[in-house]
Image (spheres, rainbow, N blue to C red):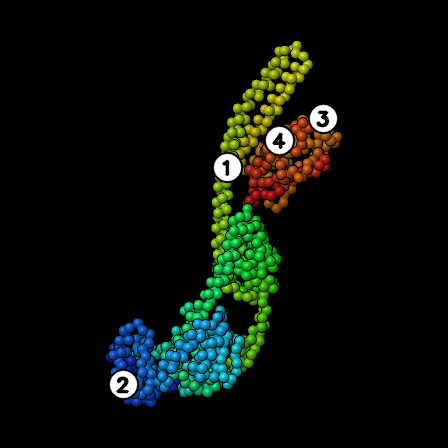
Amino acid sequence: MNPTDQDLEACASEPIRIPAAIQPHGALFVLRPEDWVVVQASANLRCHLGEMVRLSARPEGEIANHLDAISNWYRSDEAFFQTSLAGVQMTMIAHRSGGSVVVEVEPADPRPLDQVFASMRSFAQRLASQPDIPSSLDTSAQFVQRLTGFDRVLVYRFDTSWNGQVVAEAGNGNLPSYLDLRFPSGDIPAQARALYATNRLRIIPDADYMPVPIEPSDDPVTGAPLDLGFAQLRSVSPVHLEYMRNMGTGSSMSVSIMVDGKLWGLISCHSVKSHLVPHSIREGCDFLAQSLAMRISAQERTADAASRVELAQVTSRLLARMSSAEDWVDGLAGEDVLLLSQVNAAGAVLVTDSAYRPVGNVPDEASVRGIIAWLSERQDRDFHATDALALEYAPAASFSHLASGIIAIRISELYPNWLIWFRPEVVRTVKWGGDPHKLVKESGRIHPRVSFDAWRELVRMQASPWQEAERAAARELRSTIVGVVLRKAEELAEISNELQRSNQELEAFSYSVSHDLRAPFRHIVGFAQLLRERETLLDEKSQHYLQTISDAAVSAGRLVDDLLHFSQLGRASITNRPVDMDKLAAEVVRTMKLSHMERSINWSVGKLPVANGDATLLRQVWFNLVDNAVKYTSTREQADISIGGEQVGDMMLYWVRDNGVGFDMTYVGKLFGVFQRLQRAEDFEGTGIGLALVRRIVDRHNGSIKAEGEIDRGACFTFALPSAERKGRAIA
C-alpha cells in the first residue's frame, strides 16, 4: 500500500463515534438502567445542572422527577426520550447506547413552539404546491435559511459514486455561493455517510470550540468506550473542524435527506460566526428534511411511472410487430425508431446465430462481437448496463463516440444471442469546488482541502446515465422476446409434427401404390411382346400400336420405380462413412460412356475431396446429375461435361457443369420439385423425379444443392456436404 492510500484509509477509519468528548454548548451524563445511577458524565455537567447530577449517584432535583418516565421509555420501542427542565430552562434528550442510557441537556429555545409549528405548517403547504424536484429543493433551502438564521443553506445531493453536488442554495451574501459546484466523495468519508444515515442531525455551533472530556472515558463495567453515534453533542473530528475553517465558516449544521431508506443528500447550513440553533428548531428542520424526502420520492416515482408507461407502449408496439412478422428478428429490427425509443438510445444491434442487424449509430461488427465476448464472461450474463463502458472494457475507448454507454440483454441461454443498445459519449465540463484529485499533506497526515475555488474538469468517455425506467424497459423487452421466440418455436414444432405425419402418410401411400403398380406394368409389357410374336400377320399399324403400348408401359414402370425409390428415401437410414467420391464419379462416367458410345462427349473430371455419408445414396446423386448433363447436351455436336470439387473450410463442394440447353433462372425454384420440368417432355425423356431425388438425398446428408443456368448456355449443379467435424448444415 502506498503512503497516499495509508493516509486516506486512516482518515476514513477515524473513530468518529467514540471521541470520548462532547461540544461545550450542552452537557451529558450516562445512567445505568439497573438502578439509574450516573456512571459517566461530561466535565462541564455542574456548569449546566449544578448539583442535580453527580457521578456514582442517582440524579436529584428536577431530573429525579423524570426517572419514572425515563424508565417507562426505556422499556418501550421508542428511540428517543425528550422533555423540558423548566427550572433550569434546558431541554433533556435521552437515547440508548449499548446497555446504558445517554442523557444530553441543552439550553431551551425561548421562542414559543406555536410559532415554530405555524412556520412548519406554512412550509408544508408551499412544498406541496411545487411542480418538480428543483423547485422543491429551492423552497426548502430558503425556508431553512429563514428558520435557522444561518448565513448560507445548501442542498447537497450524492451521485452513485458518492460525489456531492450543490443543487439548491439560499443565503444572505456573507458566504460565497457554491451552487452547482461538485465535491469529491473523499470530503465526506464512508463512515461519516453511514453515521448521517443513522443520526440525521448534527450541529457545530462553534468551529473553534474546546472539546469537553467525558469522565471516565470508558464504561466502568465493560471497559468499552462510549458510543456517541446518536448523541447531538458528540465532539467531531479535528479534520472536519479544519475543513470548516478552510471554508471560512465558524458554525454549521447538517440534516440528512433519506429517500426510500437511503441517504439521498444533505441540507448543509453554514455561518461565518458561531451560531447555535436550539434543539426544537433542529427538530423542525429534521421534520422539514423528511417531508422534502417524501416529496422527492413522490416526484421521482411519478416521473418514473410516466416514463415506464411511455416505454411500455413502445414494448407493446414492438410485441405486435414481432408477433405478426414471419421472422421475429425482422419484426424487431425492422422497427428501428421503436427499437431505439425502447431505452432512448442512439443505436442498437441485434445478434443471433443466423443474423446481425445493426440499427442507428453503432460500432463496427468486430467491435460489437468483442463486447459480446466480454459480456459472455461476466457473471451478470443476462443483463448489463453502464454509462462508462471504457472504464469496464478498455477497448471501448476507441469507439467511445459511438458507445460510451450500453444496455445489453441476452436473449438465449444456448446461443450468444444479444440485443445491445448504445449511447454516445457526452463530453461535459464538471465544475468542482477545488481540485478533486489534489491531496494536501503535511507532517505525515492528510489535511482537508484548503481551496474551494471552482475547478473545471473535462469529463470524457461517459454517456448520459440510463434511468431505472429504461433499464426496466430493457428487461421487459427481453421477457417479451423470449416469449415470442418460445411461441414461434411451439408453432414451428406443431407445423413440423403435422408435416412429419403428412409426409409419413404420403410416403406410405406412394410406397403402396408404386409397389402395387409394378406387376401390372410388367404384365402389359410381357403380354404385348407375346402378342407381337404370336400374331405375325398383323399389319404395320397394328405392330406400331403394340410397340407404343409396350414403350408406354416401360416408361410407366420406370416412373413407378423412381417413385418407390423416392418414398423409401424418407425412411431409409443413413450410414455415415468416408466415401471415395473419385471412385463414385469414375463409375458413373464409365457407365455413361458405355451407354452413349455414339455420342461425342468431352469429359473433364477433376480431383474430388473425400465425403462423409452413404456411398450408395451418393452414387445416386452423381448418376442423376451426370445423366442430366448427358441428356440435356444431346442436341450438341460436341458435348462438354466437367466434374469437380474442393474443400472449403469444413464443407465439401462438388459440381457438374455442361454446355447443354440450360434453363431460365426465373424458374430455378421449380427445378428440384417432383414432376417439375423446365423442358418439354417430348424433347427430353425422363420422369421428372431425378432432381427431387438428388435434393432429398443431399438434405438427408445435412447438405444443400443449388443450380445455375442460362438458356442455351449450359447449366451447373453444385452440392455441398458437411465434413465429419462440422456441426450444422452445409450451405452450397
State the separation of the CA atoms marked 4 and 3.
25 Å
| In the image: residue 561, left or right of residue 126 | right
In the picture of the structure, the residue carrying the numbered disc 1 is 500
Toward the right, the furthest residue is 637
| Percent x, y of residue 590 | 66, 30
Whether pointer 3 and pointer 2 mark residues with C-beta atoms closer than 8 Å, the reply is no
Q: Residue at x 70, y 32 (%)?
A: 633
Categorize mark 1 by other alpha carbons within 10 Å: few (<14), some (14-19), many (20+).
few
Q: Residue at x 58, y 37 (%)?
A: 698
Q: Residue at x 44, y 75 (%)?
A: 126
| In the image: residue 326, left or right of residue 718 | left
Residue 216 lies in what quarter of the image?
bottom left
State the separation of the CA atoms marked 4 and 2.
116 Å
- N-terminal of the pair, mark 4 or mark 2, is 2
Question: Which of pointers 3 and 1 indicates the residue nearer the eye?
Answer: 1
Whether pointer 2 and pointer 1 mark residues with C-beta atoms closer than 8 Å, the reply is no
Whether pointer 3 and pointer 1 mark residues with C-beta atoms closer than 8 Å, the reply is no
In the picture of the structure, the residue carrying the numbered disc 4 is 688
- N-terminal of the pair, mark 4 or mark 1, is 1
Check the image and report above or below for 408 versus 270.
above
